[in-house]
Amino acid sequence: MVDHSETNDRRGFLKEVTAAVAAGGTAAASSRAEAEPPPVRSDKFQPESFWADRMEPPDDGKKLGWFIDTRRCFGCHGCEVSCKSENDVPLGNFIRQTFYQDEGEYPTVARMFMPMACQHCEDAPCIKACPCGALHKEGGGTVAIDYNVCCGHGTCVDVCPYGAIYMDPVAKQAVKCHNCYHRTELGMEPACVPTCPSEAIYFGDLNDPESEINQAMNEVREADVELTQLRPEKQTRPRMWFAGPAVEVIEERIPREGESYSPDAYSIFNWKGDSEVSS
Amino acid sequence: MNVSTSSRRRFLTLGLSAGAAFAGGLAGCGDSDEKPSTGESKANEDAVGRLPQGIDLEKWNRIKGTPYRLGSFGTMPGVCQLPGPQAKRNWPDRNKYRDVEKIPGMCQLCSTICGIIGYVKDGRLIKVEGNPKDPNSRGHLCARGQAALNHLYHPERLLYPLKRVGARGEGKWKRISWDDALDEIAEKLKAVRDGGHPEEFAFHQGRQRSKDALKRFLNAYGTGTQLSHRSLCSGNRRAANLTYLWESDWDLNDVEHSRYILNFGSNAFEAHQGHVPFANRIQNGRFRNGAKLVTFDVRLSNTAGGSDEWFAPFPGTDGAIALAMGHAILAENRHDEAFLETWTNVSVEELRGLYKSYTPEWAERVSGVPAADIRRIALEFAEAAPAATTMCNRGSSAHMNGFYNDRAINLLNALVGSVGQKGGWCWSPWGGLDPIVKTPPMPPGAPKKSVLEDPPEYPLANVWRRMRVGEIVYLYLLQGRAKLQAYMTYNLDSPLTWPEESLTQQVLGDEKLIGYHVCINAFYNETAHYADIVLPWTTYLERWDLDARASYNLRPYVGLRTPMVESLGESKDVREFFPELARRIGDGMEKWYPENDVREYMEKWASTVPENPETGKQGLDRLLDEGAWEADREPFYQPFLQPVSETDMRGAEVGEDGVILKDGTGIGIMLDGKPVRGFRTPSRKFEIRSAFIQKIGRNEDCSELIARSGMTKTKSRPREHQGHDVDISDMPTWFLPREMENLRDNELVMTSFKWNVHNHGRTMNLKWLAEIVHSNPAWLNPVTAGELGLSDGDWIELTSYYSTELEHQSPHLKRDDLDEVDGRRKVSSMRVPIVTMQGIHPRAIAMSNSCGHSQYTSVAQARRQPAEGGHLVGSDTGRFVDADWERNMWWEDTSGGDHGAWKPNTGNGWNQNRLMPIAPDPISGQQSFHDTVVSVRKL
């Protein structure tokens, strides 16, 4: 391997950037924690008796999860468009969205990519908040919506810490990633997974030691690269893990409670860093 | 779900709003939505102890949107009719992929041609994915490929033949039948043919993947005026590869097995003709093999942004840096002495002489990249060899000095001995289909050539292969250097993609210059706008081809395109109507079409594909089943060491230089007393010094040299180029175009680029791609912006200038039509906004080249409603209604041209080719897309 110690090496530069963000972030988070209510919007939750059953997935022995290697992702949007195509997602709305962020000052600049979708939390706030009981779990822990029930309260959007849910503009029902269970039940992969030219997205059964996702995560661990999660302070136990500095650098821009993925993320004025222009 | 009556009553009484159902960020919905009221719900919670629950049908009926209006075709992609509490349907549909047909195909939304699988149900294509059996792309598919459904099912797709009824370019049309269209076209073409100048019928292709079908028709007709866009793309890159190898114009970098990948100007993560197969292997090389990726690029592309190191050279100095790297490698004796002495046609001493003055300090002066880094990277590269490779593309080659840039870059591989090595710089003799498949007999090539296809001024344009010089076609017509009685365009968008938009439009619109124009396209694009007849072409999902690309497995393969659904409307492929046109033209053309239908032709063509022992399927049947077949061959590593067989050696003569000739043709070279293949060049070596190109430049006869190479396609034609000598250096060198020497304070070098969701001219009509990128503000370094008094988002006037270098080197272009302004010839001006980016060289300004359509459907024009005009006469907008586009499109520019009112990221951008001058590299004819000097004026 090449020695990067005295170089213009962006791997090294990115380590510095993320350390700075983490240091700043931790400080902010702890001060926020003291001043504000609990990390999730529990003020909007239903009583536990109402959602306890729906929080329990049917027992098929599977534990479905995601691993996104942001070091590999180069932001081709293939996963996003595949998802749009698979699910007829309306323009202006997104089940999956990849965020870009430029970091650094000329000539030491890097571009990072952060693919985002529903985190399929084990302790899903959307399930707890859904007033009509549409949100539930499918086999393997997939958090899904029953469209025979959902009538558009939108409280799920209010409480999702990751902005992963949108309200369909015509049907006025909640939509989010459903792990393509209609495909996985037939032995296919979710639409975003096989298409990725960079092999950055992994999905599968964490209970299966031979699964590709476990293999990929083990490879990363063996390379001494940290596996992280997004907004762990929310304590929702998301089923998505990441590798790479993009998570920390881009975290700030990812939508939160009360928000959904928006077209604004694609505007170059928003992801280039240091913008004087908003769009 | 049971809800107690009392709670529902309470819920209705309190009239709770839908909370944050209509969150910020959802633009363009158009319905009146209730606003979030967190405070109110908290108050209610306090009042009742818990939130209301259950299905509130009354509320849902109030808030749900107006149902989508559908055409007779039904739902289009993107129109999702979620069930709603009363509908009792399932979503996502668990039956979606049951009883579905999987049909193989090959994408054509860029030039990479990834294998795909189409999922078809009840005659409708419902999803497209990558085909895991494609040996090159291995099942992956980019955003473009995933937008296939937008391409197939588009409300403004061209479905019926059209005939012009107004003046050319007026946009007035009427529908005609195929029968009438073919009759008229046959009559016109027959007249041209009978008049004795068949070469005055030109066929001009954009992206084509049916080479056999086009060649068959045009050769049978007898016209050699087969124009292309190759010189706008890869002319210099190919010429540089051919100079070293002769055998191949395409380097295939074995990156999956590399330890070091040195990238000059290639954006493989977003574009590059090898895009998905290449990018996938680059990432595997890095993350499984520990390869380091270093990128030199004027702009921070996604490739540069994701690399391990990025350097921004001054535009066009890649070659200087590469030469300096060679100098550093030799200075430290890190070169591969054995390879250089054995396998190149120069000695190490000669190379030291060549590199002597190209020091890293010199390169720092011209490029701005620190000498210490140049040296360090060079030595890292050498250390990793032989599993080290360069990669380059238009970033380094689409310059006036691009041929030399790429020669300097590729030479690094020879220096470190990674040529043909695993993990190194490789190539293959099969540029596409495995030679096992052969088309039915083809008519011989047409003898009569046109200056449009074979301009005498560009020595390397057509010498090894016919690359032609596409960008001078309209200029030469305007200058009266050729005449066109008939012109047929095929998947071409020249007013958008050719340099000098206004000149292109002027020529296309002039019936005296182009007598008759037939446009073949799946959509009404800018080229169709200037046609006399427009023929509705099928998409790549509705037609047949055998197809393949140069594979990174270093083995050839065969892929299949087959109709996945019935062609929409009256769209037809050339394979369907060329035979019919040939029959109507007659006079012997028809005899080249003996088959009854396209399938019969395809069966003949694919008949030699061997049987799969597991399925028993063979030929076309096997391809229909699997989509692709890859030969079981050894990867093409170190082909120069392959032994020459005893059979081949019989009757051969060995010269003093060790070259083995048989009947005057080279077949190998002696190596340590044994006959081996060597390189397929005249010297049988990697030709660092190329006497050949120097002679070709001076129009000296080279037939003997060519014979020794055995490369029969290479032609020596000194008569054709008589009077047009070009000084081509036999050794790699470098020069700076003279206009770069003294840039004024407000002058920058304009560069161009592609986005990962677009190809150059054909994807902006695809809504899922246009949603992500539809606008192209100019990238400007913030320090430069500050110096020019500009802030992020400001509007500027860009003025472009013709190259002073070309004025000197190519006087035949005679651009005195361009006004002289302050010592430069002005090409054009255009007003655009800027975006200040850290990721761009301070002396450069970058605009992407896919924006600014004036036609090509409402999507490409970023209009919610179609523009006025007759361009929809050939579409069926009653049947195919995209309600999603009509309702949810959010990026329309409502500023009406008022810059102050322009909302960033709205509108459809600006056509960079309005500014881009016609600028062919004098050696190969490559269009210099990245050298344009522009001046900036704040508005």
Image (spheres, rainbow, N blue to C red):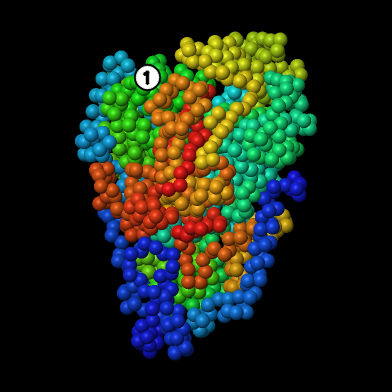
Counting from the top left corner in percent of width and height, residue B402 is at: 56, 30
Which residue is located at x 47 percent, y 88 percent? B46
Q: Quick check: A182 left or right of B135?
A: left
Q: Which residue is mark 1?
A: B481
Examine the rendered structure and indicate whether residue A167 appears above or below residue A109. Answer: below
Examine the rendered structure and indicate whether residue A123 appears above or below residue B907. Answer: below
| Local crowd size for mark 1, using a 10 Å CA cut-off: few (<14), some (14–19), many (≥20) | few
**Residue B137 makes an appearance in the image:** no
Examine the rendered structure and indicate whether residue A42 appears above or below residue B255. Answer: below
Which residue is located at x 36 percent, y 62 percent? B28
Number of marks: 1
Q: Quick check: B585 left or right of B769?
A: left
Counting from the top left corner in percent of width and height, residue B878 is at: 25, 51
Which residue is located at x 28 percent, y 16 percent? B194
**Residue B30 makes an appearance in the image:** yes
Quarter of the view holding residue A32? bottom right
Q: The residue under label 1 is which amino acid type?
A: Arg
| Figure quadrant of the N terminus of chain B | bottom left
Write down the chain letter for disc 1.
Answer: B
Nearer to us in this view, B657 or B724: B724
Nearer to us in this view, A65 or B618: A65
Looking at the image, which residue sits at the far front? B822
Counting from the top left corner in percent of width and height, residue A142 is at: 53, 67
Which residue is located at x 75 percent, y 21 percent? B349
Q: Quick check: B781 left or right of B639?
A: left
Nearer to us in this view, A166 or B613: A166
Dot 1: what SS? Answer: loop
